Amino acid sequence: MIDSVDDTDTPSPSRDRRQRVQAAVTGMVLLKGLARLGGRASLTALARHVDENPAKVHRYLISMIEEELVVQDPVSSQYQLGPECIQIGLAAMRLADPVRSAEPSLVRLRQSLEMTCFIAVMGNKGPTIVRFEEPGLPVTLNVRVGSVLSLIWSATGRVFLAYLDDSRVERLATEELALISPAQRATLDPVDPIGVLKRQVQEAGMALVRDTNLQGISAISAPVFDFSGKVVAVMTVLGATGGFDAATAERVTRALNEESRLISLSLGQSRHAS
């Protein structure tokens, strides 16, 4: 006769798997918490931040130190992200591509707004369209993938001008400004035309133009940031000025802001960035 076994204290395979999954989740929470605290923190500060018992947090940190995901400063005793976290981050950064990340957003914008939208990057000659989405009934335009846009007159260009701290961008804008007509010049600030354009975009967080770059066309553009806070691309939605009323502009602004935020997050921008 085989004796019966009381297995109430014996972990079942399913419970063991759940425990391993929970342990992995806790470890990830701690690593993310450490990152959000600037990459280094005391045991007390980290435990408070993730709302966990310090003794439990300490056990996890010891395991992560063994795997070089975390290191402890011998002087301050603070814990900080280790060399393996750096390698993970570098691998993710190498894969971060604003154009590829923007493709789903462009499709969603085109479908929800039924308007033309595109993403541009800063090229040698100026803002250059690299991905383009059109609705079923597109507005007739003379811009396509590869088109270079104005830094001063296009919404896309104004966002790059406002956010990209690059002497090359300033030089291109100054060269463009020197070639405009007196009538165009009269629409800009007479003292500091480039500086005023920058401040207007920075205050609004985006750029809106009506009939300046393309006659009969209005456009709204928003910046896309990478992990360092640098603008790496600009997303733009455009349509016929006749149908671009205040309500439309507000709807486009909300959708564009949300999609540019999602792309920026996918490129490593902090969720808490302003």
Image (cartoon, rainbow, N blue to C red):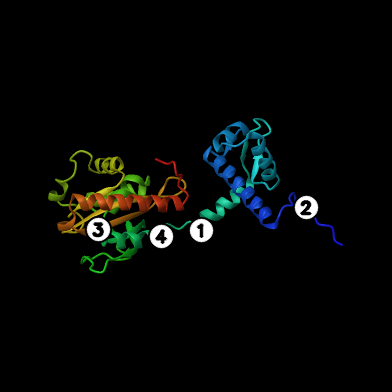
What secondary structure is found at the residue carrying circle 3? strand
Mark 4 = which residue? Answer: 99
Question: Considering the image in quadrants, where does the N terminus appear?
Answer: bottom right
The amino acid marked with disc number 2 is Asp
Q: Quadrant of residue 219?
A: bottom left
Q: Which of disc 4 and disc 3 is earlier in sequence? A: 4
Judge the density around disc 3: few (<14), some (14-19), many (≥20) Cα neighbours within 10 Å.
Answer: many
Asked if residue 138 is positioned above or below residue 182 in the image, the reply reads below
The amino acid marked with disc number 3 is Leu
Q: Which residue is drawn at 27% across and 66% down?
A: 135
Q: Which x, y percent locates residue 246? A: 19, 49
Q: Which residue lies furthest to the right in this view?
A: 1
Q: Which x, y percent locates residue 215? A: 16, 59
Work out how far the residue at label 4 is from the one at label 1, CA to CA, in angstroms.
Answer: 11 Å
Q: Which residue is drawn at 36% across and 53% down?
A: 259
Work out how far the residue at label 2 is from the one at label 3, CA to CA, in angstroms.
Answer: 70 Å
Q: Quadrant of residue 190?
A: top left
Work out how far the residue at label 2 is from the one at label 1, CA to CA, in angstroms.
Answer: 52 Å
Marking on residue 265: none
Asked if residue 146 is positioned above or below residue 156 in the image, the reply reads below
Mark 2 = which residue? Answer: 6
Q: Which of disc 3 and disc 2 is earlier in sequence? A: 2
Q: Which x, y percent locates residue 154? A: 25, 54
Marking on residue 238: 3
Q: Which x, y percent locates residue 234? A: 34, 54
Mark 1 = which residue? Answer: 95
